[in-house]
Image: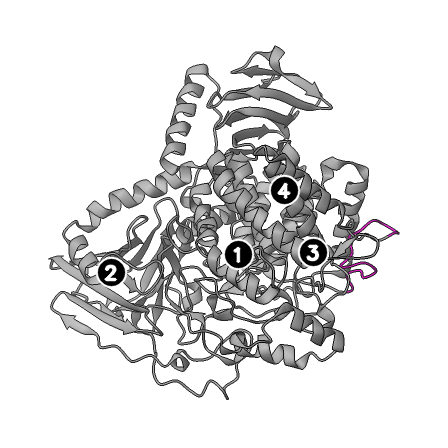
Amino acid sequence: MAELNLVRKLRWILISIMTGCCIAFGQVSEKHNLHFNALATSWDEGIPLGNGLIGALVWQKGGHLRFSLDRSDLWDLRPVKEFERPEFRYSWVREQVLKKDYKPVQDLFDRPYDRDPAPTKIPAGALEFDISALGEVASVELSLDDAVCTVKWKNGARLTTFIHAGRSLGWFHFENLPAMLKPTLVPPPYGTAHDSATTEVNSLNTSDLQRLGYPVPEVKYQETSSSFHQECYGRLSYDVSVRWIQLNPTTLDGVWSISSRGSPYSSAMSADRMTASAIARSYSGEFKSHAEWWKNYWSMSSVSLPDSVLERQWYLEMYKFGAAARKGAPPITLQAVWTADNGKLPPWKGDYHNDLNTELSYWPSYAGNHLEEERSFLDWLWQNRPEFLQYTRTFFGTSGLNVPGVCTLTGQPMGGWIQYSFSPTMSAWLAQHFYWHWRYSMDREFLETRAYPWIKAVATHLDELSVKGADGIRKLPLSSSPEINDNDITAWFQETTNYDLALIRNLYASAAELAGELGKNAEAQKWRSILSQWPQLAVSEDDGRLLVAPGMPLKESHRHFSHLMAIYPLGIVDWGNGDADRRTIRSSIAELKRLGPGWWCGYSYSWFGCLAACARDGETAAEALRTFATCFCLPNSFHVNGDQSGTGKSKMTYRPFTLEGNFAFAQGIHQMLLQSNNKVIRIFPAVPEGWGDISFSHLRAEGAFLVSARKEKGKIVEVDVYPEQGGVLRLENPFGLGKYKVEGIPMMEIKTIENVLEVRTLKDKEIHFKSKSE
């Protein structure tokens, strides 16, 4: 897919040049890089490198340069023993809620998550160099265009290091060394476990890695290499190897690798064999193919914004996405390939949180034109489908499909706040990603073999789980709205919440649409019939704002906008639908503003930016995203949940690192520049009035259209549309009342319907719209 997109892009550029209609766009450049005058002294502020499978953070610990090493399939998968009990049933939970006896529920489902050190993501170790003799650091830089970290010392010494984009190899190159360095491998501080039955930890899981009880590995040293083998729980083990070569008295090259056994992503070759093979190919030889991958990655899309803070943050987020997501690797967890290196379990065990975190992490992949990287998420969901089907039968007693809200690498439930970790609609939110992949790619095979089968299975689960009242209206036996009322019994609702209801309504509408697309008319009618049996969204009578649940408005500032799912990301309530929906959008956002951001996390600001863009409010969207970038991120751009600025943007000031806010930020930028829901493409729908000069290149719209556009002095002057699959293009007239000309299709073939330009496109035949004032 990536290579095909590059070929298409090059062909598009060539034709554009020949026809004289090439738009000038921004690209990743030095101004977007990370620059520091010293190495970070904390792991979570290190320079991030990765390729979706392995990762490293470059920082300084004491007098040592430290690479914190990680591999995304390293998981302790010991089971939660309570989940084998006969009470492990949704119906049993409902019985306790109705009896108002909630402690047994918390003891069974919540306590193990806090009590036990595992299941959990685990780190791989570290690689260190004693740099005490090198003196003071002059500069540290992360070059985004080729994913290389460069460290320079004032004495002239220099390090360049990268993780190969397509191989499980990390390379380092030192030059101008006053004395030769030797790398040292440092295993994680595993050891004798404490008594997990009596040791309690908090929800950030800051307990020691020692609680896992692994044997301490022996590091094997040889003249130009070292390695260790770490035994973990069950069948899992992994190896770390580093190998180096002294090219001359002042130059050192080296390569490291991590391999795993007993994982669904186990290595075909050991780390030691990989480094032995790689060292013969040389640093410079490996760098060429690595840099080519990143060149292709950055060719997929670009933006140019008049706000330097937002533009730079977008490139930083898309860099991290490229470093954390790769087809064939595990999907992005809370910390992806940068698991905590502080001797502790990672925040929230570094798990897969599907009540927001995984979904937000992949938001920018669609409009950002990175469907190849997004496939790691959908492939993982599909790969674990048998596990999810079994979980659904056991816990919910239905024959369809649901996914644990908090789960492991292999799909087992981990527990936690039960309303969300065992939500009945979790797979409905995940289903939107299957739907989006179809709509943004128009890949017919994916529709037939992945999107519709997944959505159909989820629809079957909810059909069997829901109950009908005497009036024929359906409801869930229990409902919730993440994370309203946290983990209290009042977090359960007897009426279906807007969160659950929006997901359900969206799911059945998608199921009917896809069944119809496949010619399964009877199934389409079935899903439409079921959809008609669910109530409409609950709104306030006074201003039409969305409620949490019937009769219950949002009462206080809250980090999770779960009651507004219908606006974004689902788009059920849409600005283009007319006055009623616009009123609901405006009043719902006004309520968030009135209640204030006191208890927002960083990701709340990113999500709020997306919501404001849905209201075509560019000023508010830009302000929210700027607050995220300047107040909720560490210097290396990592989102850390709490406000780090001291300016009162949130009462939450803690700093656990998670990635979903970063990637939701990038999607907020996309929403400002391009929207394509409800099968109409809108150019610059939500940018501030003061943004006179803007452009973007190859953002992807639903319908598999690649779109580029340029605005000068506040007016849209050019729009290019590349139809990957052909089909009907519906483009809200970007020139307003102004006149335009078109190249690539006869003007007479364009219909104008209520300010929407409609034209039937041909596969791979681009269309260029241009203002006549140009």
Q: Residue furthest right?
A: 542
Tag 1 or tag 4, which sits nearer the N-term? 1
Q: 164 or 648: nearer the eye?
A: 164
In terms of secondary structure, where does tag 4 sit?
Answer: helix
Image: magenta residue range: 541-555
Mark 2 vs mark 4: in front: 4
Looking at the rendered image, the disc whose residue lies closer to the viewer, 4 or 1, is: 4
Q: Secondary structure at mark 3?
A: helix
**Quick check: can you spot residue 774?**
yes
In terms of secondary structure, where does tag 2 sit? strand
Whether 663 is among the magenta residues is no
Q: Nearer the viewer, mark 1 or mark 2?
A: 1
Which mark is on residue 256?
2
Specify whether 102 is left or right of 344: right
Q: Which residue is mark 1?
A: 358
Residue 85, image x and y in percent? 55, 77
Q: Residue at x 60, y 58 (%)?
A: 426
| Percent x, y of residue 737 | 71, 21
